[in-house]
Image: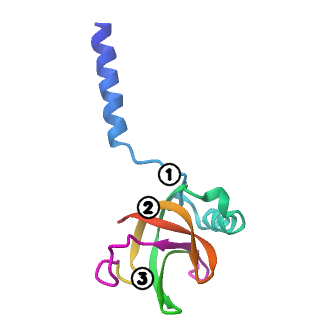
C-alpha cells in the first residue's frame, strides 16, 4: 500500500512539473510599475549582473527607425499613462517587419535572455526574444 501511495505521489509531482509555468529570473509581468522601473534602472547601471538572465515582460509593442535601423521595444506604463519603462528587444533574425510582428501599440508578452548588444557604436543590454505571445 505504501508503494502505491509513493508511486502515485511521484507521478502527481512529475505531472505538476510538466504543467507548471516556467520560472524566469525576472518576470516583469508580475511586477508593478515601480518595481519594474527600479529593475530597468539597475539593468542600465549594472548590465553585467543581468547578462544571460531569463526575462518575461508584458507590455505595449513599439518600434521606430533610428539611423536607418528599426529598433523594437516592449513598454510598460504607469497608472497615469505618462511615464514609460521597458526593454529593447531583439527579435529572431528570420522575422520580417511588419508582417511577422505584433501591431504597433498592441499588448504583447515576450520571453528571452538578456544580452549585451552593440548598437550604434555603444553597448546596450537587450532582451533577445525566444518567444512572442
Colour pattern of the rendering? rainbow
Q: Answer left or right for 76 relative to 18.
A: right
Q: Where is residue 59 shown, x and y percent of the image? A: 47, 71
Depth-wise, is mark 3 or mark 1 nearer the camera?
A: 1
Which stretch appears magenta?
78-101
Q: Answer left or right for 91 relative to 28.
A: left
Q: Where is residue 65 shown, x and y percent of the image? A: 48, 90
Q: Where is residue 104 shown, x and y percent of the image? A: 39, 84
Residue that numbered label 1 is attached to: 24
Rendered view: 11 above or below 27:
above
Disc 3 and disc 1 in contact, CB within 8 angstroms? no
Q: Residue at x 32, y 80 (%)?
A: 96
Q: Residue at x 63, y 67 (%)?
A: 40
Q: Give me the disc on residue 105.
A: 3
Rendered view: 92 above or below 13:
below
Q: Answer left or right for 40 relative to 99.
A: right
Q: Is residue 79 visible?
A: no
Toward the right, the furthest residue is 45
Q: Where is residue 89 shown, x and y percent of the image? A: 48, 72
Check disc 3 and report its element: helix, strand or loop: loop
How far separated are the C-alphas under marks 2 and 3? Answer: 18 Å
Q: Earlier in the sequence, mark 2 or mark 3?
A: 3
Residue that numbered label 2 is attached to: 111
Q: Earlier in the sequence, mark 3 or mark 1?
A: 1
Amino acid at each position: 500500500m505504501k508503494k502505491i501511495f509513493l508511486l502515485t505521489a511521484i507521478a502527481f509531482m512529475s505531472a505538476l512539473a510538466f504543467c507548471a509555468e516556467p520560472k524566469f529570473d525576472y518576470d516583469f509581468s508580475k511586477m508593478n510599475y515601480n518595481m519594474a522601473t527600479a529593475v530597468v534602472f539597475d539593468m542600465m547601471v549594472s548590465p553585467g549582473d543581468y547578462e544571460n538572465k531569463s526575462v518575461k515582460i508584458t507590455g505595449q509593442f513599439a518600434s521606430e527607425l533610428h539611423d536607418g535601423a528599426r529598433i523594437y521595444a516592449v513598454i510598460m506604463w504607469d497608472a497615469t499613462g505618462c511615464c514609460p519603462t521597458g526593454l529593447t528587444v531583439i527579435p529572431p533574425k528570420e522575422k520580417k517587419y511588419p508582417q511577422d510582428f505584433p501591431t504597433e501599440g498592441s499588448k504583447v508578452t515576450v520571453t528571452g535572455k538578456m544580452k549585451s548588444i552593440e548598437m550604434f557604436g555603444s553597448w546596450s543590454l537587450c532582451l533577445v526574444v525566444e518567444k512572442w505571445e
